[in-house]
Structures are given as structure tokens and as C-alpha cells.
Amino acid sequence: PIMLHRALMGSLERFFGCLIEHYAGAFPLWLAPVQVILLPITDNHTEYTDKIAEELEESGIRVEKDLRNEKIGFKIREAQLQKIPYMIVLGDKEVETSTLSVRRRRSKETRTLDLKAFLNEVIEALKIENQKFIVTEWKHREEGGGKMSKVKGSIIEKGGVNISTVAGKFEKNFSKNI
């Protein structure tokens, strides 16, 4: 007997297809292609928008600016449909007080934060999401007679995983022992 088999997609493509289907496009913060979108209300706020975008990019956050000449409600709706985790609305009040009006993907609540507080919130959210991911990792222990054991916490014995915030950037260091 002869079996013919043809796969139109490789295993990596199938994995990404399953991942997209699982999250329904609403990826967690660490996986989202755009983590933050800046929504200026008018063209007068473009300079402040550029300044905030530059500071977020320097901190390692993936950011986009919506500089279209559209109503702010339309821009917010578009960002929600794109399932971007954080939306930042920038208007006259935010420019005057050097703050940000922050809105989460699934929330109608808008909070006013300064840039430093917002960066701390995003970095902390990234830490928590990565710790959840690491806790589910499995490690083979040679000294345990070949038994599989679940990793507990964010630090694996022998320096396996170290998650730290260094100079405002989020880094993951994985040991070769894993």
C-alpha cells in the first residue's frame, strides 16, 4: 500500500494558526504585535504624540501612532477591533499636564497616568504574563531518575530562568540547562 500525503502548511504555520484561533486575535501583551497605540485628538497634539512614542520605543514597547484626521471615537473603535492591549488618548488636557489617558482593550474606563507610572504598569504586566508562561514549563531532572517535574516560580534551580527589569527594558535570560 502507498499513502500520499500533502501538507499545505508546515508545523510552524499550523502552530500560529492554532495560536491565533485560541486567542481570537486578542493576544496577550507580550505577544501582541502592537502593544500600545497613541490616539491624538487633533493635529495640534502630534508633537506630544511623537515624544511619547519615542520614549515608549526606547523602553522596548511596541507602539504605533494613529495620526489620521478622524474623530477620536472612530479611532478608539478601530483600535478595539484591532485588539490592541493599550490605547492612549492625547488631547489638550494631557499635553498641559504631561499625562496620558490610558484605556485597556476590554475596558471603557479611562485612567490618567503620567508616563513613568504607565511604563511601570506595562513592565509589571509583562513580568506577570511571562511568569505565568514560565510556571507552565517542564524540566527534565537527571538527578531525579528521569522524572518530569513542574517548574515552580520564576527562577529555576541552577539559574535556569531569570526575569528582570534592567534600565527600563524587559529581558528574558534562559539558561542552556533547560
Image (cartoon, rainbow, N blue to C red):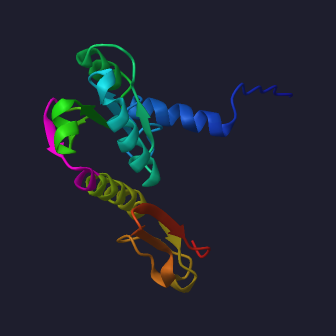
Above or below, 157 against 139 in this view is: below
Q: Find residue 5 and report its horizontal and vertical position in percent.
A: 78, 27
Residue 10 belongs to magenta span: no
Q: Does residue 150 appear anywhere in the picture?
A: no
Answer left or right for 78 relative to 173: left
Above or below, 68 against 175 in this view is: above
Residue 117 belongs to magenta span: yes
Q: Find residue 136 and report its horizontal and vertical position in percent.
A: 41, 60
The front one of 62 and 43 is: 43
Answer left or right for 176 relative to 101: right
x 51%, y 70%: residue: 139
x 63%, y 34%: residue: 13
Which quadrant of the rendered structure holds the N terminus?
Answer: top right
Name the image quarter holding residue 89. Answer: top left
x 40%, y 34%: residue: 23
The front one of 163 and 2 is: 163
The front one of 3 and 51 is: 51
The front one of 154 and 113 is: 113
Q: Residue furthest right?
A: 2
Segment tinted magenta in the rendering: 108-118
